[in-house]
């Protein structure tokens, strides 16, 4: 598994980053990181689209799922059978959004390892990780815009990255509130108050925990990692705005009784 990850994910990303650095005029490693991030996120765009569509579909069927859970509350076996029958009749796969997420996480880990290893090596490219057609630039220029040393932590870049992640998660929360708001009766509101939505509680916690961890790692690790994370988050914000607007125009899922 380790060899598969290295040869199939880590090494291609490593070579892409070095290739971009080689062809960029002036040899700016920061520009290479930005371009590599955009290219990789663009390549993963279909997976992200599928994941968001799957999440939207699962959210639309939540009222029906809660009905089934309430109907068979005292019998776990009947509840499971009813849920599987419901998914089968409506041709819904509850795990369809997992594979895109896993693949995106694998790529994220690979990018992190590439940037971390290059930084730890003193920004010296390792020939053993390069393909034969990729030239080795040796020592690479590590200053971002000629000012920021990508080998050292940057508080300003870490703060910008944490704020961008906060904005992204806030945007998701606001969208979910808009989707849940319409047509809620007083009784359903009371029921919602009696039974806390643990998913909503966890999302609210992550609104602050996620950016907080990003800030911590940003001021701990080399700023090259924070630069990647910032560009990746900004790309995801633009991507979410596009996909949410696109999916909002689609009709809701029609469910079998």
Image (spheres, rainbow, N blue to C red):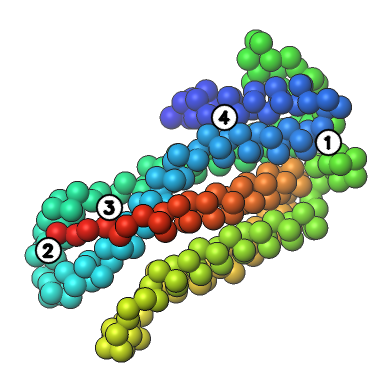
Residue under label 2: 257
Secondary structure found at label 1: loop
Element at label 4: helix
- Between the C-alphas of marks 1 and 2, the distance is 61 Å
Label 3 neighbourhood size at 10 Å, few (<14), some (14-19), many (20+)? few
Residue bearing mark 1: 142
Picture disc at residue 94: 3
Q: In the structure shown, which secondary structural element does the residue marked by tag 3 occupy?
A: loop
Dot 2 or dot 3: first in sequence order is 3
| Residue 11 x/y as whole percent | 58, 25
Q: Nearer the viewer, mark 2 or mark 3?
A: 2
Work out whether 123 lies above or below 153. Answer: above
Q: Residue at x 75, y 17 (%)?
A: 136
Q: Earlier in the sequence, mark 4 or mark 3?
A: 4
Q: Is residue 176 above or below residue 185?
A: above
Mark 2 / mark 4, whichever is N-terminal? 4
Mark whose residue sits in front, 4 or 3: 3
Residue that protrudes farthest toward the top in the picture: 132
Rendered residue at 83%/25% (across/down): 25
């Amino acid at each position: 598994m380790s060899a598969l990850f290295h040869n199939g994910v880590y090494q291609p990303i490593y070579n892409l980053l070095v290739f971009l650095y080689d062809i960029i005029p002036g040899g700016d490693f920061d520009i290479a990181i930005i371009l590599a991030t955009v290219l990789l996120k663009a390549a993963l765009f279909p997976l992200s689209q599928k994941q968001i569509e799957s999440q939207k579909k699962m959210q639309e069927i939540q009222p029906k799922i809660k009905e089934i859970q309430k109907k068979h509350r005292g019998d776990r076996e009947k509840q499971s059978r009813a849920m599987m029958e419901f998914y089968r009749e409506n041709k819904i796969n509850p795990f369809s959004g997992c594979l895109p997420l896993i693949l995106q996480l694998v790529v994220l880990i690979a990018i992190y390892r590439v940037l971390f290893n290059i930084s730890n090596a003193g920004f010296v490219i390792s020939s053993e990780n390069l393909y034969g057609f990729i030239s080795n630039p040796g020592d690479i220029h590590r200053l971002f815009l000629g000012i920021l040393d990508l080998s050292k932590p940057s508080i300003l870049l870490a703060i910008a990255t944490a704020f961008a992640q906060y904005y992204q998660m806030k945007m998701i929360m606001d969208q979910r509130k808009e989707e849940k708001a319409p047509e809620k009766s007083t009784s359903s509101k009371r029921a919602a108050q009696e039974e806390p939505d643990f998913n909503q509680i966890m999302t609210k916690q992550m609104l602050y925990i996620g950016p907080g961890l990003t800030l911590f790692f940003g001021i701990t690790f080399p700023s090259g990692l924070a630069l990647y994370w910032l560009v990746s988050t900004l790309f995801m914000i633009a991507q979410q705005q596009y996909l949410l607007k696109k999916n909002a125009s689609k009709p809701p899922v029609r469910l079998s009784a």
